[in-house]
Image (tube, coloured by chain):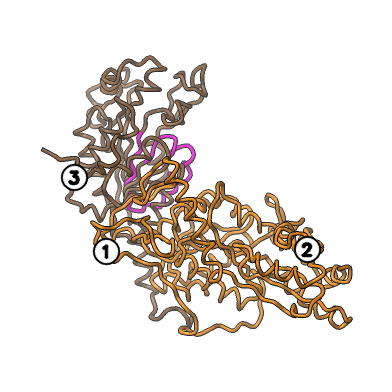
Amino acid sequence: MFVYEEYMREEMFPLIWCKGCGNGIITKSILRAIDRLKIQKDDVAMVSGIGCAGRLPGYVDFNTLHTTHGRPLAFATGVKLARPELKVIVITGDGDGLAIGGNHFIHACRRNIDVTCILFNNATYGMTGGQVAPTTPMGMWASTMPYGQMEPSFDACKLAEAAGASFVARGTTYHAVALEKLIVEAIQHPGFSFLEVITDCPEIYGRKNKLGDPADMLLAQKDKVVPIDQQGRYTPEQLAGKVFTKILHKHEATEYTARYQQLIDRVKVEGNGHAL
Amino acid sequence: MGAVAAGCRFFAGYPITPSSEIAEQLAALLPTLGGKFIQMEDEIASMAAIIGASLVGKKVLTATSGPGFSLKQENLGFAALAEVPCVIVNVMRGGPSTGLPTSPAQSDVMQARWGTHGDHPVIALTPGTVTEIYTETIRAFNLAEKYRVPVILLFDEILGHMREKVEIPLPGEYEIVDRKQPTCSPDEYVPYGPTDDDVPVLANFGEGYRYHITGLMHDEHGLPTEKPAIVQALQDRLKRKIDRHLDDILSTESFLTDDAEVAVFAIGSTARSARGAVREARDLGIRAGLLRPRTLWPFPEKDVAALGERVRTIVVAEMNMGQLIYEVERAVHGKTRVLPCLKADGEPIPPSQILSAIKEG
């Protein structure tokens, strides 16, 4: 039996997340993945931005850094480059990572620094009350799109791949066991790894869009996705509107901190630089 | 170079005139010392990256100018609240907006104090010579480490691009301060717990002391809180950690002020013009002097007040539409006449303009 409490800061209970929120499932999957990889708590730096997902690091017993809105990847880049031996995990949301932090996101993908970025996609700004997100599907209600979302939404995984990420995957909170495996693979990948997790905000997004109770929303995820390695079983008509899960893209590329170390090895001189 | 001498081994930046030369030099120099340089995707990210690198124990620097300084304010506030040592160079140019990219100004002096939202501790230094750019940069790193606070180095475009004879101190001739690290066991460790000097002892990430850092108001464990008593105590301590160490932080230069009737208050390259104007005034028989802060924030209130007791008039010369003059007026409490000597057209203030103001005073 896995003991989550070994990794939790219990003095922070109760959590601010609403009942039925998917963040708990993702948190547990992350903790199981880290445990499975036998990474020491001291060797993990978890960095987050602002929003419901951003509160996760406060609840877990690692080196944790809760930064400003949209900026966790930029902070994490500094942490990782300055101390490459740390396992750096970024927790972000769809608003944090793709709207206000969109520029940092594409450049982190391009740079290929060994950071694992886990993006909680609940299609809304939950903490601030259900405003429209770059991932809100067309037509859905948002407090700032009261007549329904009018803008097309982002496919975060396609964006990551196009920007150069060397590992791109998607999971869901419904498939929690598969999610744990994806997190393990993302952390193990030597380079920038991006994992989008489809999750739910039943309290605001679900209630206002009349999507049922948390269990209904979770079950609906199952019908929305197709594992990419099983797409051959479906007709094009059946695949219309579906979203692929599992590892969507992977390529080998020199990791950034390793490349920087090669540069140091090549140009390093002795002394404190006073003579230069 | 001063940064490297102070122990800086991490720089993140974004190109902007007239500060790009700093990034270019460090891009070449830092890897030769085992340090790291990274050009980030924007100014916000470069401020974020240095904070991240500082949290694992590096001495860190970023450099920018006007518009970039505006963008850095968000994470500068994070560093102030979370108490992350870092040094930010702002080579001031004409503003607002894109303004005058290659012309000097001193119009970011209030932004250096109040640019980010909320009350916050900050230190800003204003060197006046190229040698001082070296020595004050070392001091900036030392103050950042000692008080765990962002330290802003305010240059102006003239100083930023100036070439003059410099005297570089040898290693051993200057003090190097390193931030305190915990000596207790991780079980006993309280990151924002009380200390004798009001500066917390924050462990470098990855060295066995796991704790939380947040931009939210937090308790002594670093965990978020909204409890009014804890929040007020944090605000009080952040202010106190600067206020009670003014003797260590403040640094001013007085030039011919002992018998002065009229004194000029100026920083940076304007103080160089002022020095010339003071000499010329003396030649004309006017007992003029100059007060030049090397530490602008916290403001040298006592020095200005004491000067105000002695002189008839203080001329405040600054390359802007009048910013520091309000601080000077506040410090002298109406006891002294305060005259503006301003210019904001992208040209430096010549000694002749300051001399005219001295004569008027």
Q: Nearer the viewer, mark 3 or mark 2?
A: 2
Q: Amino acid at mark 3?
A: Glu
Q: Is residue B12 left or right of residue B212?
A: right
Alpha-carbon distance for marks 3 and 1? 22 Å
Q: Nearer the viewer, mark 2 or mark 1?
A: 2
Q: Which chain is brown?
A: A
Residue at 48% over, 27% down? A131
Q: Quadrant of residue B49?
A: bottom left
The residue carrying mark 1 is: B184
Up-down: is B134 above or below B112?
below
Whether residue B284 is visible, yes or no, is yes
Alpha-carbon distance for marks 2 and 1? 52 Å
The residue stretch that appears in magenta: A92-120
Mark 2 or mark 1, earlier in chain: 1
Residue farthest toward the left in the current orientation of the protein: A1
Q: Which chain is orange?
A: B
User: Would you say residue A106 sits in the magenta stretch?
Assistant: yes
Depth check, front residue: B245 or A153: B245
Up-down: is B261 above or below A58?
below
The residue carrying mark 3 is: A6
- Which mark, residue B335? 2
Evaluate if marks 3 and 1 touch, with contact meaning CB atoms under 8 Å apart. no
Q: Is residue A180 left or right of residue B343?
A: left
Are dots 3 and 2 on a single chain? no
Please rate how many residues cluster around mark 3, counting C-alpha atoms within 10 Å: few if below 14, some from 14 to 19, many from 20: few
Please rate how many residues cluster around mark 1, counting C-alpha atoms within 10 Å: few if below 14, some from 14 to 19, many from 20: few
> In the structure shown, which secondary structural element does the residue marked by tag 1 occupy?
loop
Residue B92 position within the rendered picture, expressed as x and y whole percent measured from the top left: 66, 61
